[in-house]
Each structure stands twice: as C-alpha cells, then as structure tokens.
C-alpha cells in the first residue's frame, strides 16, 4: 500500500511539475464519427470513454451509433453544483434558466445539434471556452495553462493534451475556439 501511494505521489508531482496532461485518443471520422479518450473517474476508479467533442469531425460522418447502456454511463453521486455556484453561471447555455432556489441543481441538457445521434460514449470531456471546461478549471487551480492541443492521425490514433508543454515551435496551425457554434 505504501509503495503504491509513493508511486501515485511521484506521478502527481511529475504532472504538476510539467503542467501537462496527455490523453491517448482513439476513434475516427468514418465509420465511427467521433474521437474519445479513456478516463478513470470515481473511487475506486472506473474507466469511462469520453467524447472529446471536436465538432469539426462530426460533420462528415454517416455513422449512426447506438446509445450507451445506462450501466456504462457516469452517474454523479452527491457532487452536483447548486445553481447559485459561480461555475453554473459559466455554462454557455442558449437559454439560461432562472435560479429561483439557490439549492436547485445546476444543469443543462446535452443535445446533439446535428442530424446524427450523439456518440455512444459515457459522456463528454468539456473542451469549451467557458469556466466549466476541464482546461479552464485546471488552469484556475494552477495545474496547467489553459491550452488544448490535439493531434489526430488517419489510423484512428492520436493524443489530446491540456497545457502548453507539448506545443511545437513550428509546423503548427493555431486556431481559437469558436465563440459560437454554427
């Protein structure tokens, strides 16, 4: 037990020292129509596949994935935010519901904006510009800089990194996250 704890602390120290998180990416444009990462969530850890929601990729897909079974979806337990929490106001919602009772749950419905159903993953890894995105939250904690880098190959592999340690000095095309979805 002590050796395992020491290994975990060393890994955490390296992550914090490098200010970088890297996730292997799997998936493809066709036939799947989405890319995803695997993430351990909960205690004890369970592996969840999370769509990385790169909207550009989903435009060309004719895939019709099946819905994720309920037992494979992430179900938060006593860790929801009240609507009065500052992160709740950071959600980019088309229509904001009034917070009539400060203890009401902060929430929104995830809907697939396109003609295809959402990917059959357990959830989505938030990569938006808002305060609720994983990169914004890690940046506000001082863990990483608010930089998202992804590299996707033709064979369905790639990586997603949060932080600026893997940013090459040349050969990179930069783009800002869109202010509004189209």
Image: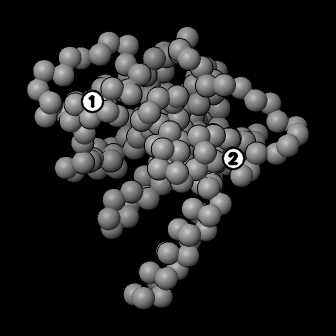
> Picture quarter containing residue 118?
top left
> Picture quarter containing residue 17?
bottom right
Q: Is residue 58 visible?
A: no
Circle 1 crowding by C-alpha within 10 Å: few under 14, some 14–19, many from 20: some
Residue at x 41% of width, y 40% of height: 123
* Picture layout, residue 93 above or below residue 160: above
* Mark earlier in primary sequence (1, 2): 1
Residue at x 33% of width, y 67% of height: 44
Q: Nearer the viewer, residue 137 or 181?
A: 137
Q: Is residue 154 visible?
A: yes
Residue at x 33% of width, y 59% of height: 42
Quarter of the picture containing the N terminus is bottom left
State the residue position of label 2: 164
For numbered disc 2, what is the local secondary structure? loop
Residue at the right extreme?
170
State the residue position of label 1: 107
Locate residue 81, reporting x and y percent: 25, 39
* Picture layout, residue 123 above or below residue 1: above
Q: CA distance from mark 1 to mark 2?
A: 30 Å
């Amino acid at each position: 037990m002590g050796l395992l704890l020491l290994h975990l602390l060393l890994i955490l120290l390296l992550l914090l020292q490098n200010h970088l998180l890297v996730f292997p990416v799997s998936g493809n444009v066709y036939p799947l129509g989405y890319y995803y990462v695997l993430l351990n969530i909960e205690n004890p850890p369970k592996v969840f596949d999370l769509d990385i929601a790169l909207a550009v990729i989903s435009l060309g897909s004719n895939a019709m994935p099946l819905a994720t079974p309920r037992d494979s979806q992430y179900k938060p337990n006593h860790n929801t935010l009240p609507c009065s929490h500052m992160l709740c106001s950071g959600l980019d919602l088309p229509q904001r519901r009034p917070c009539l009772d400060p203890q009401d749950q902060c929430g929104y419905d995830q809907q697939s904006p396109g003609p295809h159903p959402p990917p059959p993953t357990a959830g989505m890894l938030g990569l938006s510009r808002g305060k609720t995105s994983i990169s914004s939250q890690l940046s506000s904690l001082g863990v990483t800089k608010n930089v998202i880098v992804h590299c996707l190959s033709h064979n369905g592999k790639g990586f997603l990194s949060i932080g600026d340690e893997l940013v090459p000095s040349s050969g990179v095309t930069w783009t800002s996250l869109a202010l509004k979805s189209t």
